[in-house]
Image (tube, coloured by chain):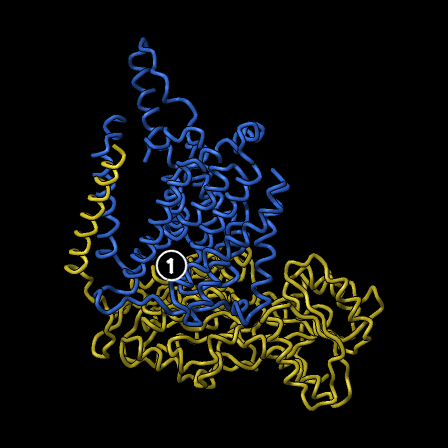
Chain colours: A blue, B yellow
Amino acid sequence: MKIFLARPAVRIAIAAAFMVLFVVAPLVSTPFLNYQFSMIAVFAVALLGLNVVMGYAGQVSLGQSAFLGLGAYIAAYGVSHDWPISVVFVLSCVIPAAVGMLVALAAARLRGLALAMVTISLPIIGVPLAKRFPEFTGGSQGTTVSWLNAPGWSGLADDQWRYYVVFVIAAVLFVLGRNLVRGRIGRAFAIVKSNEAVALSMGISPYRYKVLAFTIASLFGGAAGFLYVAIVQYTSPETLSFATSINLVAAMVIGGSASILGTILGAAYYIVVPVLAGQVDSTRTALISGALLLAVLFLLPHGLVSLPRRIVQLVNGIRRRGRSTVIDPPGDNTARGTAVEPESQEQTQ
Amino acid sequence: MKNSLFSKRLTGTVAVLGTAALLVTGCTRADVGGSTSTATASPGITDTSLSLGISSPLSGPTAGPGSCSVAGLDSYLEAKNATGGFEFGDGKTRKVTLTHLDDAYDPAKALSNFKQLVNDGIFAYVGALGTPTNAAIMPVANQEKVPQVLLVTGATAFSSDQKANPWTMGLLPTYYDEGHTFGALLAGAGKPLTVAVLAQNDDYGTDYVKGLTDAIAGSPVKIVDKATYEPTDTTLDGQVTQLAASKADVLMSAVSVTPLQVGVLTKAQSLGWLPRIFLPSNTATPATILKPGNAGAYPAVYSTSLSKVPASPAFANDADVKAYNAAFAAYGSKIASVYTPHCAWSYAEGAILEQAFKGMKAPTRASFMEALKSIKGFHAPMLLSTAVVDTTKSDQPAISGLALVAYNGTGYAPVSKY
């Protein structure tokens, strides 16, 4: 099975099938579903940033929502002042990245709980700041924008057009993110994560790479903010609230830490579960979401991304019990889902 | 090897994109339900039924008021359905159902819920609680011409320009109105008074202060000191000490956080400063604010009120309250467990909707909006006699007429003079 999946032709075929699915889906689904698909793409980008800093580089960040909100405010401000969209996009990425780098230059000297405290402060400071400057942010009532309407030649509805814009940007960012964590920098992150002393002895500065990880995370956060405004067409202090950060961390862990596919699954979880919980009983959404979260963490401690592996494990276990004399082959039971073994991650994607 | 793999992938991508382009040009979505001609019925309405939708925070810190904004309305609708249904202006009788979803006070989730409800075919979106959540929905509702009405929020944005946003309307008097009502009381005293103001450092607080300032303009009443706070502050002792130094006759404490408001009441008396105090309607509950804050020590504590309090002995024999309590016990208590005034407000909202249904000549959203915007001089159940429903003004929310009340040691009683 694994060898079959590892063949380039098969992988291209699977990727192509998914591409076709992603391209065709918005044409045949309702505006509501397109909104959900688009929001998954938006939060996948935010989660990708969080995964770079937490999953791959192993640093605690509880402030991702601050960068999401900052990017969203910059996008909303730029759009309402008729700046060119490309400029707005670049600023939405660069300014949060610069802010993230500034914070990280100071914060990356810390580790563990102290670092977590510094990152918590970002959304906690950000919310009152956003309310304090209504001329830029619209205050508590937020900023509404109207843009990214489908051009006439496309023959698309607005929701379809926005989906494609967001999807293309998210796909490009994911390719960049994937290359980053698979390459030299990703390997450096993995060493910094596992042992800083070893990293130093190999000539890798943990401090520099931590700052880099935070900067990249804030850049992705800012980009996600831009995409958020593209879909929701609105932003307010609620976007950068601390609760959003915590939910993002939970979604990242649920999807699968240090995994690209896990990031997408985490985003899907983040968007879909509240909708499903609302279908079951809208007065008990928090309870249902909490129960699901616990269930996933108990059954799939390595996140949703480990589901296929877990199923294989269970099936093998049942088979083994049937033929108890056969010694089980090693390999499947080792802990996976960490960046130290990028190759094992490949196989799930 | 690597290059050939890359080129293969590239070819694959190009092929997919090419196919996609063909598909895009070939099959775009047909226009779904976009037309709102008066001849055909709008979505969500049949000859026997009408479906409404609401998204409010049913979990998280605002879950209490959010749940009440659903529970009160649902109580009214279900109680009326149980007696046969609502009579409509076109001569038909319909049962009205309410679908409620949870947005946890998140604007993106609220918009998602709105789209879901519209997708499921609701006729109108009514009574949702929350300023940012409704602000996110407003442009979409107006673009798609879905009524987004009788919103439970004190922000001015939803009612102030109904010509620009003809499908949106608020339910409640605004924060500005509260500040203005209190300012009018002070100005009416006809003597020089000094006022100290404590307000939240954002546009809510600004609305209160602006209402007060506008009302006392030209009168001998003067604001002598101002302080602000952040909702995240843990104590307001510093602000209260600063204001106490002004020895003002009156303190307007526009604090929206319950424990902080209690702290203001206890701190001022511990400093020996006993001004007359004004509390905003959302932090003026006797049991949770006044008793813990020992409000009896002050010469007077004012607030504004809009609705009857179902648990209050003063209204125990009131017909509205009896009907409300019965309906709430039967239906609303499944949704909200704790009473907040939002339960009474959204119950009254049900009666306003009933008035609109009576005026609806055709089963369309346009006809509904027309009927809704022509209600005048209506006294809705559970509202105090001072409160009047007037939807004909295009820059005002549906309900106006806040009553000033003063604390009498156990509850509130109406007051007209300083």
**Based on the displayed image, in which of its 4 quarters is residue B26 positioned?**
bottom left
Question: Which is more toward the observer, A306 or B277?
Answer: A306
Q: Residues within 10 Å of mark 1 (few under 14, many from 20)?
A: many
The subunit letter for the residue under badge 1 reads B
Q: Position of residue B227 (x, y in %)?
A: 71, 70
Residue B206's place in the image compared with B311, above or below, is below
The residue at 58%/47% (across/down) is A104
Q: Is residue A296 visible?
A: no
Q: Position of residue B140 (x, y in %)?
A: 36, 68
Q: Is residue B12 left or right of residue B264?
A: left
Instruction: Give the amino acid type for the residue marked by disc 1 in the picture.
Output: Ser
Residue A263's place in the image compared with A301, above or below, is below
Q: Position of residue B94 (x, y in %)?
A: 30, 70
Q: Is residue A258 visible?
A: yes
Residue B261's place in the image compared with B334, above or below, is below
Question: Which is more toward the observer, B326 or A59?
Answer: A59
Q: Quadrant of the C terminus of chain B?
A: bottom right
Residue B409's place in the image compared with B414, above or below, is above
**Based on the displayed image, in which of its 4 quarters is residue B93 positioned?**
bottom left
The residue at 64%/68% (across/down) is B200
Question: Which is more toward the observer, B83 or B44?
Answer: B44
Where disc 1 sits, the SS reads helix
Outermost residue, right side = B272
How many labels sit on residues?
1
Question: Which is more toward the observer, B232 or B12?
Answer: B12
Q: Position of residue B7 (x, y in %)?
A: 22, 41
The residue where tag 1 is placed is B112
Q: Quadrant of the N terminus of chain B?
A: top left
